[in-house]
Image (cartoon, rainbow, N blue to C red):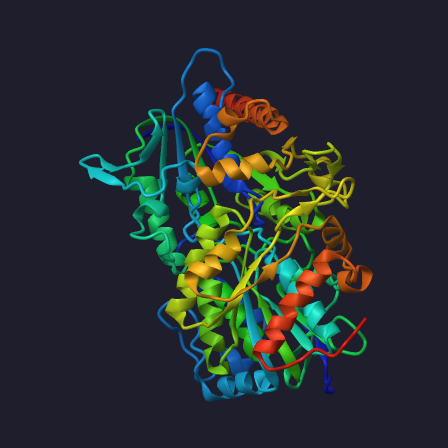
Amino acid sequence: MVKTHVHQIPLLPRPPADLSGSGEPKVLSVVRMRFPWSRLWGKGGGESRDGMTVTGNSDKMAAAEDNLAAVDHILLVLSGKGGVGKSTITTELALALRNAGKRVGILDIDLCGPSIPRMLNVLNSAVHQCDAGWVPVYVDKDKTMCIMSIGFLLETPDDAVIWRGPKKTALIKQFISDVAWGELDYLIVDTPPGTSDEHISVVECLRQHKPDGALLVTTPQAVSIGDVRRELTFCKKTGLPVVGIIENMSGFVCPNCSECTNIFSSGGGEALAEQSHVPFLGCVPLDPQLSHSLEEGRNFIQAFPKSATFDAINNIVEKILSNNNESSALHT
Amino acid sequence: MLVSRGTFVGSTGGGRNTSLLSWNRKCSSRTTRSWRTFQATRHHVALLDADMCGPSIPKIMGVEGEQVHQSGSGWSPVYVEENLGIMSIGFLLSSLDDAVIWRGPKKNGLIKQFLRDVDWGEVDYLIVDTPPGTSDEHLSIVQYLSATQVDGAVIITTPQEVSLQDVRKEINFCRKVNLPIIGVVENMSGFVCPKCQHESQIFPPTTGGAMKMCKDLSIPFLGKVPLDPRIGKSCDEGKSFLTEIPGSSATVVYKDIIHRIQEHCATHQSDVEATA
């Protein structure tokens, strides 16, 4: 998969705080300096109304089509509220899909809080460039799972990405068009919470590739459900199909006495799915073993195959696969 | 508009219950009429919800569905109590399902209006609840409030390293924009089973939690708020947790945190007056 003439992509400089309202053009020029691929920033490109380089030149669009041409299914993981476990669910779904015999990519567009590299134990990996573009970071030697995240481009993990919308949009466009994803069965896009620049941009960029749709993650609480309603509206307005709703952090079983406590209430996700006439994909319980695994970048699916969480994730994956008339290869 | 102090509440990682902590400061306001755990005086508190895409404050405060009125002196905040006023985009949406699908500049525009056009009245504390991240909203708030004496930022995290990793970025953001850090609160810190009282670390502090991070970075650690299911329930119902469940260990911690924040604000104000 990796072509010749690879070289490491330089890390992003520590970005200055952009306190001036007119800062966008200066910020964009920094991006141009660090990522000097003329086919993206050069001939034929111009400034659009929001200060973004127009990405309509034919070389770039051809590159975008090339790099995603061999990706069969694209799923976006969204939520209205932060902290409901989007990155956790993205990681576990990706691992479960791989377990089911699929080749999986993860695109992490949470530029301010990129969690995926740590969760998959590839935090200190570097991104290399080949003829087809940026090489995503592979999690394993068999190259069955790969990731692209801004986390790989920071000089240190503590560097804050203090960017306004246009610069975030620019990098997301690069991630979509310039990463040599290769042949993938599933590309899962992990998003930050909300319905703003990143979401608008990623939906616009992926529109021509006809993504399968969005997985909406919520916790059972009404406060979270309220924000997921807005996310459903976002999907409707942008024409993004909804694959289904996942209710995360749904109940906690005490390891001492097995009493199940609904720490974040219960049932809200399923009720919302029913009201909104979208599929309910399942509940994932609160599991300290899962949290521990993610902290250490271990594969939860391999470490705890008998847990209720594993079953819950697997059931969700089965539903996703059956939506696509696919079945999973059996893995222990 | 007279605003005596400003405090900025931020967390890089979403769902650290930033809104809940802002709200529970309000609860302290309800029970003790202010952030301050004090004996006799009443303080006026303003709460600005700067989370445009996920405005939770109206629901948590039990004022979802209220409308904003305008007078000659500006927009009137929605009052939960006579000394607690709130402004949120949640009050400006025609339906609870309406999504705010805005790019940065439009969000910045409304934040500016919230700060400039809302008639907050005479306020002792302005608390700004922010969305997760270090982006437009955060930059704009810091920029627009730069002429005032912002006391600082309270940063919320959960105990696990995945959250702390993002919070370190938030700390760097504060340092870059010269925003003082009042301290860090570790939320969802331990769960006690209501049946057998066994304590579980659902979000394990694999790298020492917020306390160790604060020690390493020389930042005040404000406290650990345990996971109490009744907190979430109170918020969903728009009720005051501190009033409904005054005996909870979480209540005790909240009050202690608020006390420390007030001490910081008092010290900060003295320093400002001394250098003026």
* Quarter of the figure with residue A3: bottom right
* Quarter of the figure with residue B252: top right
Extreme-left residue of the structure: B72
Give the percent coordinates (x, y) of residue A326: 63, 81
Q: Is residue B155 above or below residue A32?
A: above
* Residue A195 seen by the camera: no
Extreme-top residue of the structure: B40
The residue drawn where x is 64% and y is 39% is B188
Give the percent coordinates (x, y) of residue A257: 76, 40
Viewer-proximal residue among A188 and A173: A188
Is residue B247 left or right of B190 when viewed as pictured? left
Is residue B4 left or right of A307 when viewed as pictured? left
The residue drawn where x is 72% and y is 75% is A100
Give the percent coordinates (x, y) of residue A235: 43, 67
Viewer-proximal residue among B128 and B227: B227
Give the percent coordinates (x, y) of residue B160: 70, 46
Quarter of the C terminus of chain A within the rendering? bottom right
Quarter of the N terminus of chain A within the rendering? bottom right
Viewer-proximal residue among B208 and A157: B208
Viewer-proximal residue among B247 and B257: B247
Is residue A117 left or right of B100 when viewed as pictured? right
Q: How many marks?
A: 0
* Residue A307 seen by the camera: yes
* Quarter of the figure with residue A107: bottom right
